[in-house]
Amino acid sequence: MQIKWKWMSLLSLLGVLLFSSCTKEDDSPALQTASFALFNQSSGTSQAAGTFRILEQRNGNAAVEINLADGYRINGARFTAVIVTFDEASDSELVYANLGEINGGSARVTINPVIQLSNNLPVSYADLAGRTGYTLKILNGANVQASGQIQ
């Protein structure tokens, strides 16, 4: 009986040690971030319209976090977010990534991962943060509500 008790104590101690050495996988902050301002230029002068951040994830992919200013918080409104580049050959803008929809009630969204439209693959943080001159646009239908340039 005494040997059985020692054996049970040893197993209990081993179990406690095993479980205490396990760590919970937490949502740690992004490894790197790059922050940019969004502006509304519809009135002829540049007005602050919010911010967007490019976040590096553990796997190296990029996520984009968009926070629109309070003036965009309209219940029921829906905005579309895209990243575009200007193509000189066709003299037009091309969509690099479609970021999806922003609910006007919260006026914020995080897109993870960012998917490149031309190949349907995740974009790396280094690639997206290095795309200087590319523009993130917030659209209401075909109307540009806000935009900010990756610099």
Image (cartoon, grey):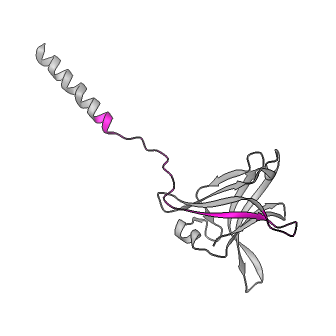
Seen in the image, is 151 located left or right of residue 104?
Answer: left
Total count of labels = 0
- The region drawn magenta spans 18-47
Residue 13: x and y, percent? 23, 27
Q: Position of residue 108 (x, y in %)?
A: 70, 51
Report the residue at 75% width, 66% height from top.
Answer: 147
Residue 73 position within the rendered picture, expressed as x and y whole percent measured from the top left: 79, 48
Q: Is residue 72 above or below residue 97?
A: above
Is 70 located above or below residue 141 in the figure?
above
**What residue is at 78 percent from the left and 56 percent from the top?**
79
Q: The C terminus is located in which quarter? A: bottom right
Horizontal side of 120 relative to 105 (left or right) equals left
**Quadrant housing residue 12:** top left
Residue sitting nearer the eye, 62 or 52: 52
The answer to whether residue 121 is magenta is no
**Quadrant of the rendered image containing residue 38:** bottom right
Q: Which residue sits at x=80%, y=67%?
A: 46
Please say if 51 is above or below 149. above
